[in-house]
Image: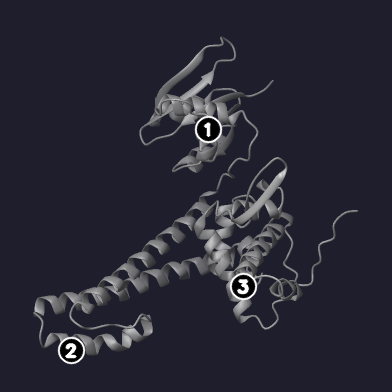
Amino acid sequence: MNSMAVGVDIAKLVFQVHYVDQETGEIVNRPIKRAKFLEHFANRTRCLIGMEACGGAHHWARQLTKLGHEVKLMPAEFVKAFNIRNKNDAADARAIWLAVQQPGKPVAVKTEMQQAMLALHRMRQQLIKFRTMQINSLRGLLTEYGEVMSKSRDKLDKEISAVFERIAERLPAALVDTFREQWNGLAKLDKQIAEIERRMREWKKHDKAVKAISEIPGVGMLTATAAVSMMGDAKAFRSGREFAAWAGLVPKQTGSGGKVNLHGISKRGDAYLRTLLIHGARSVLTHAKVPGEWVEQIQKRRPKNVVIVALANKIARTIWAVLAYDRPYRKDYVSVKPA
């Protein structure tokens, strides 16, 4: 007997549930309070529960799986196609119910450890962004008083003391002291970022998957931890090509009448992971003494940026292969296609 499909629109306090009762044929679309949500599914037969892959979805997916249900997380763009008219909780739950019954690629449910590592990455990015804003704001304010600063952080560290001494002779002490406080605050941000990175390195030492893909050229600590956390289960992807497409590292396609046109990369998926992969590829091309025969061949006929993205695509496929097949990275490995 097929599992009953259930569409769930999760929220902060009230969840909307939509399904068709298999015994009576009644269409049920009603709200359930957060505290009663798991209790509603605790004593039910196995259901196919669909939810959008949004905030809190992975937590509830893990809890419902423990109760014996099958949970399918779907991208919001996939669900949006089934919401025909008004946008409200009841309509969203119905759209999710329709979407979960269609063939499509679900989002892999992440473990708590994977979500924890992603939280560290997000907090680190937030601190870096705030640090950059502080530096640019301070540089811009000093420019108003004729002090043009260097862009490099190292040069700023060397020049800033002399700049504060010069402006202290002609500007109010309250403003100069505030400038100093803003600059000293950057050291605290540096310390917070360094501490997060230290915790990431500690996690890397104890995680087999992260250690395995760290051996791939172009995959550092940040890329390795982010890839393992965002991918979830590597076997959720049928191939390395599918994982690279999920990361947005393949050409966007348009066409009609049997003619297919290829454009720039699709840039779908998570921009943060794609950025790390591209930076890793650029590092390989810049610093590697022998990038490899494949890279050398493609460099002869393609521009530099195209080569970088192509190498990032290859790195993504290699990451998937190492994790999906649970094999160590081998530099001399040659893939043999079946006859």
Q: Name the residue under label 1.
A: 81
Residue 131: numbered disc: none
Q: Nearer the viewer's eye, disc 3 or disc 1?
A: 3
User: Mark 3, mark 2: which one is toward the viewer?
Assistant: 3
Res. 146 visible in picture: yes
- Give the distance between the C-alpha atoms of the residues marked 3 and 1, in whole angstroms: 38 Å
Label 3 vs 2, first from the N-terminus: 2
Q: Can residue 220 be seen in this view?
A: no
Q: What residue type is labelled 1?
A: Ala
Q: Where is residue 19 in the image (x, y as percent from the top left)?
A: 53, 21
Query: Badges 3 and 1: C-beta atoms under 8 Å apart?
Result: no
Pair 2/1: label in front:
1
Note whether 276 is above or below 16 in the view shown: below
Label 3: few (<14), some (14–19) or many (≥20) C-alpha neighbours in 10 Å: some
Label 1 Cα crowd, 10 Å radius (few <14 / some 14-19 / many 20+) = few
Of the two numbered discs 3 and 1 on the same chain, state the one appearing first in sequence.
1
Q: What element carries label 3?
A: helix
What's the residue at 43%, 34% (across, down)? 10
Task: Specify the amino acid type for callout 2.
Answer: Glu
- Between the residue at mark 3 and the residue at mark 2, the CA separation in whole angstroms equals 45 Å
Residue of label 3: 304
Q: Eyeballing the image, is 131 above or below 319?
A: below
Query: Relative to the observer, which residue lies in front, 2 or 130?
Result: 130
Q: Where is residue 97 in the image (x, y as percent from the top left)?
A: 54, 26
Q: How many labels does the image show?
A: 3
* 119, 152: nearer the viewer: 152
Crowd class of label 2 (few under 14; some 14 to 19; many from 20; radius 10 Å): few
Q: Where does the N terminus fall, quadrant-wise?
A: top right
**What type is the residue that disc 3 sits on?**
Lys
Q: Quadrant of residue 189?
A: bottom left
The label number, if any, that marks residue 165 in the structure image? 2
